[in-house]
Amino acid sequence: MTRYRCTAMTLLLAIAGVCAAENGGQSVVRDGFEIHYAALGTMDIPAETARAVQVTRSANRMLLVLNAQRADDAASVRATAEGTVTNIVGQAKTFEPRVVEDNGVWYVLADFRVSGGERLRFDLAVTPEGASAPIPVRFQQTFYPPR
């Protein structure tokens, strides 16, 4: 677990939220929890924020951001994630999620190397603290290099 004492995560989640909204707004609600998710190019993250969350900014890297909340009161809860990330031909990407806490809000972050125009399939199991079982999160997204 890593603890950050800055507003970097708040800024990151705001950026991810904008990107998620452009891609249809992303969340899964199940068993009393809501899992918010977004994937964005690391060049979309301000340099200061990337440094704070230890993410390398590159045209060939993207970042997955997950946040678990209780559905009844929207309180953030710690969660873990596992699963697979593959491209259209089935090649697996290294998936090494890490849990980050910022001012009482929990996130799971994972970054990936991507090729321009690459479509990735995310097949994840997110387990919020207190959940009776993992919650599946599945989506696909195409990543384009920044212009």
Image: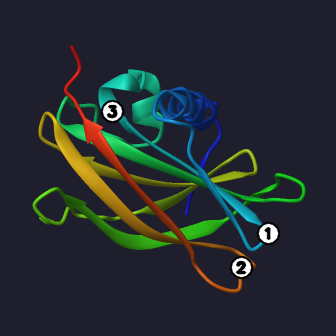
Which residue: 64% across, 31% down? 7
**Crowding near the residue tagged with mark 2, few <14, some 14–19, many ≥20 C-alpha atoms within 10 Å:** some
- Label 1 or label 3, whichever comes before in sequence order: 1
Front position among marks 3 and 2: 2
Task: Examine the image and state in which quarter residue 128 appears.
Answer: bottom right
Secondary structure beneath dot 3 equals helix
Tell me the kind of residue under disc 3.
Thr
> In this figure, which residue is indicated by the disc labeled 1?
32
Where residue 96 sits: x, y (%)?
34, 65
Question: Which mark is drawn over residue 90?
Answer: none
Answer above or below: position of 103 versus 80.
above
> In this figure, which residue is indicated by the disc labeled 2?
131
* Viewer-nearest residue: 38 or 53: 38
Answer above or below: position of 45 versus 31.
above
The reply to whether callout 1 and callout 3 are in contact (CB within 8 Å) is no
Secondary structure beneath dot 1 equals loop
* Viewer-nearest residue: 15 or 89: 89
The reply to whether callout 2 and callout 1 are in contact (CB within 8 Å) is yes
> In this figure, which residue is indicated by the disc labeled 3?
42
